[in-house]
Image (cartoon, helix red, strand yellow):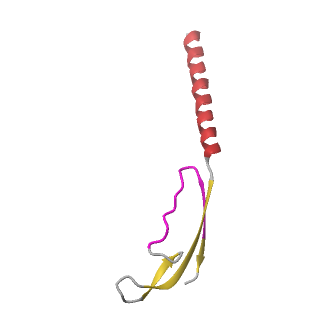
Amino acid sequence: MRIVQSSRLNLFFTITLILLFVFSYSTVQAKIVEYELTISQDDINITGEPVQAMTVNGNIPGPTLFFNEGDLARIHVQNKI
C-alpha cells in the first residue's frame, strides 16, 4: 500500500514539475507586439467616383494584426474622425 502511494506521489510531483517547466518556458517566449492605428475619414476612389470613407492608416481594409497566443498586444488607436 505504501509503495503505491509513494509511486503516485512521485508521479504527481514529476507531472507538476514538467507542467511548471512548460508554462514558464512559454511565458519566456512571449513578446510585446505593438501597433499604431489611425482611424480617419479620407477620399477614396475605387469605382472612378471619389467618396468619403473610414480608413485605417489610410487604407481599406485596415492592416492585419499578427501576434501569437501569450503575446502582449499593445494597440494604440488615434481617432481622427
Question: x and y percent of residue 38 in the render?
Answer: 57, 75
Which residue is drawn at the image coordinates 47% and 81% (left, top)? 54
Question: x and y percent of residue 36 in the render?
Answer: 60, 69
Residue range (magenta): 61-76
Check if residue 62 falls in the magenta segment. Answer: yes
Question: x and y percent of residue 69 in the render?
Answer: 53, 50
Q: In this view, does 63 lie above or below 39?
A: above
Quarter the C terminus occupies: bottom right
Q: Is residue 65 above or below residue 39?
A: above
Question: x and y percent of residue 60 in the render?
Answer: 45, 75
Which residue is situated farthest in the left direction here? 47
> Who is closer to the viewer here, 46 or 26?
46
Left of 30 or right of it: where is 64? left
Quarter the N terminus occupies: top right
Which residue is drawn at the image coordinates 57% and 21% (left, top)? 11
Which residue is situated farthest in the front direction here? 48
Instruction: Give the overall secondary structure of the magenta segment.
Output: loop
Which residue is drawn at the image coordinates 60% and 19% (left, top)? 10
Which residue is drawn at the image coordinates 58% and 33% (left, top)? 19
Check if residue 75 falls in the magenta segment. Answer: yes
> Who is closer to the viewer here, 37 or 13?
37
Q: How many marks?
A: 0
Identify the image quadrant of residue 78.
bottom right
